[in-house]
Amino acid sequence: MHSHEDIKITKVASSKIQGMDFSHLPFGKYFTDHMFVAEYSDGKWHSPEIVPYGPICFEPSMATIHYGQSIFEGIKGYRLKDGSPAVFRPFDNHKRFNRSAMRMEMPEVPEEIFIGGMKALLALEENWIPTAYDHSLYIRPFMFATDQVIGVSPSQTYKFMIILSPVGPYYAAPMRIYVEEQFVRAAPGGVGYAKTAGNYAASLHPAAVAKSRGYDQVLWTDAVEHKYVQECGTMNVFFVLGGKLITPGLENGTILEGVTRDSVITVAGDMGLEVEQREISIDELADAYANGMLTEAFGAGTAATIAKIAELRYKDYVMNFDPENQPVADQLKKTLTSIRDGEAPDNRGWMMSVK
């Protein structure tokens, strides 16, 4: 199979970087000079190459457009304090990508393509990693079906790509969250744990309805009883309840196994916090809030890292949290940030060096 050295590289004639304003980087709007592409056909991956970032050509019958075999990941690259580029936990994203691939009946992507392609691309685009605090290079690997046939069956051919976007802080002002009881994100046995495009398409309407009511996001509940909380729009959710950190468990496959989620659980354990992963009913949260036991609520995801929740509304019951007084969320964000920018020791090998 191909090593990192076998990747063919075609460079742009001139870089766009000179025209970039790194002090103004809205999320996911600007892309670097190059992209990584690999093809799958006849049962194997081949032709890994780096080419100038630009349009891709396909026929109207391309399978993805009709039947949605499309998966992706979100990863971040940082510049460490010593100036070297590094990526946060990409091997965990690679594993999750392949779990998504399996659920969507797509081929797994081997490490030399996923990680090897990422390293080669980042080595070329290293200057695009922003250096300012809370800035990063967002890495988007994705794969989609490319058969030019209309028919409901798994595609025989696929394209895997990686594109890069320099991003500023996801200044999520503390969020107002609406507990969703009508629409469903995922059911046991479904594709909730897969990072597949359709999950996000399905979430747009409920999110728009919540926004029309003055809320930023929804907190999904289970498909059967609309009683157990699952996750927020683009994040896993955490609560500080009675001094413990609690988050919904992964057992029935309805929530995304977030890499930031896992990092938060690990770091919280290091901080001496007791962590519980289990079913959490909205009634338990409301009761705990009424008794003064529910003190913090926040989301965790790659884009925002830690996003505080200022308000949680369930039916007509409103739970308010003071964003200025969320010591657990603050400490978690601080610790994760210091690992990612090389201030704190990386005892777990979470940062992958690009060189």
Image (cartoon, grey):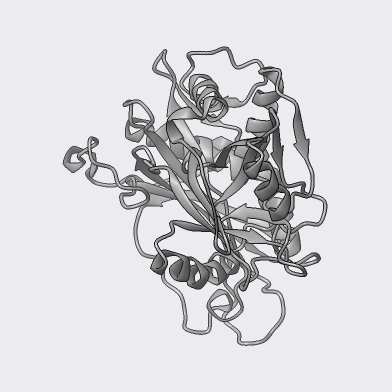
Residue name at image x 63 percent, y 32 percent: 264
Q: Describe residue 194's horizontal placement relative to residue 38 as left or right.
A: right
Q: Describe residue 166's horizontal placement relative to residue 151 as left or right.
A: left
Residue 78 percent coordinates (x, y): 44, 29
**Relative depth, front residue between 58 and 49:** 58
Whether residue 43 is situated above or below residue 265 in the rendered picture: below
Whether residue 213 is situated above or below residue 131 in the rendered picture: below
Count of marks placed on residues:
0
Check the image and name the residue furthest to the bottom. 150
Whether residue 143 is situated above or below residue 86 in the rendered picture: below
Residue 2 percent coordinates (x, y): 63, 43
Can residue 304 be seen? yes
Locate residue 4: give its quadrant: top right
Can residue 1 be seen? no
Q: Describe residue 258's horizontal placement relative to residue 14 as left or right.
A: right
Residue name at image x 61 percent, y 72 percent: 183
Q: Which quarter of the image is occupied by the N terminus?
A: top right
**Relative depth, front residue between 163 and 59:** 163
Residue name at image x 43 percent, y 30 percent: 324
Residue 352 percent coordinates (x, y): 57, 27
Locate residue 79: give its quadrant: top left
Whether residue 339 is situated above or below residue 278 in the rendered picture: above
Q: Describe residue 86's horizontal placement relative to residue 29 as left or right.
A: right
Residue 136 percent coordinates (x, y): 40, 34
Check the image and name the residue furthest to the left. 19
